[in-house]
Structures are given as structure tokens and as C-alpha cells.
Image (cartoon, rainbow, N blue to C red):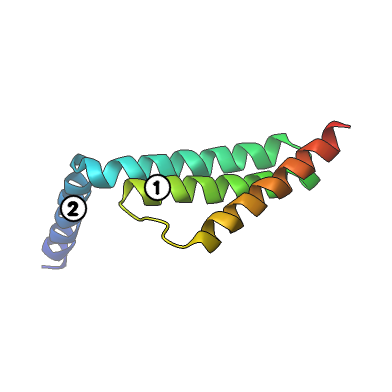
Amino acid sequence: MANVGWLVVVSLLINELKFLALKWDYALPFLINQAGSVLYHYVLSSTELSLAVPVANWLTLLVTLITGHILGERINDNRNYIGIFLVVCGICMCVWDRSK
């Protein structure tokens, strides 16, 4: 009797995963987000630590913004744009300092 319950749970899980994988409006942002995670770990492993952390955190912000935009989220507040601009300026300063 316990095996039947386990099979039902596994069957439901497989059906749910198939359903989500076939919905492009779910699968595309998920894949972009996962690609961002891979890029994040690559940057952390291949760059000097004092530069890797700000760049990797900026990439996390960028991938999150892109994924949110695909899902339909909009930035309505000018303070968000100012914050994004300041983060990009800080990253540029870090890269510029390291390139000297």
C-alpha cells in the first residue's frame, strides 16, 4: 500500500515538471536565470576576488532584472534607475582601478 502512494507522488512530480518545462513563459526565464547562475560562478572562480565579488553581484542584479522584465515586471520608480546607474558606476570604477 505504501508503494502505491510513493508511485502517485512520483507520477505527479513528473507530470508537474513536464507541464512547467513545456510552458515557454516559465521555461525561458528559468533558463536565463540558470545561465546567470552559471555565469556568476564562472566569474567568481576565474577572476581576482577583489574584482570578482562586485562584478558577480552586478551580474546577479542584471540577470534578475532581465528575468523580471521577461516575466512582465516593470521598473516604475526613478530611484531604481539611479540605483542601477550607481551600481554600474561602482563596477566601472573597480574595473578601471584593476586595469591600471
Q: At which x and y percent is residue 5?
A: 14, 65
The residue lying furthest to the right in this view is: 100
Residue 10 in sight here? yes
Q: Front-most of 39 and 16?
A: 39
Q: Is residue 67 above or below residue 98?
A: below
- Describe residue 94's horizontal placement relative to residue 84 as left or right: right
Residue occupying image coordinates x 46% and y 38%: 35
Q: Name the disc covering residue 47, or none.
A: none
- Distance from disc 1 to disc 2, alpha carbons, whole Å, reads 22 Å
Residue mark closest to the camera, 1 vs 2: 1
Q: Name the disc covering residue 16, or none.
A: 2
Q: Mark 1 highlights which residue?
A: 67
- Sequence-earlier tag: 1 or 2: 2
Q: Front-most of 12 and 66?
A: 66
Figure quadrant of residue 13: bottom left
**Badge 1: few (under 14), some or many (20 or more) residues near its Cα, within 10 Å?**
some
Residue occupying image coordinates x 31% and y 50%: 71
Residue occupying image coordinates x 40% and y 47%: 67
| Quadrant position of the C terminus in the picture | top right
Q: Amino acid at mark 2?
A: Glu
Q: At which x and y percent is residue 66?
A: 43, 45
Q: At which x and y percent is residue 63?
A: 48, 45
Q: Amino acid at mark 1?
A: Thr
Number of marks in picture: 2
Helix, strand or loop under label 1: helix
- Describe residue 57's horizontal placement relative to residue 77 as left or right: right
Q: Front-most of 100 and 56?
A: 100
Residue 57 in sight here? no
Helix, strand or loop under label 2: helix
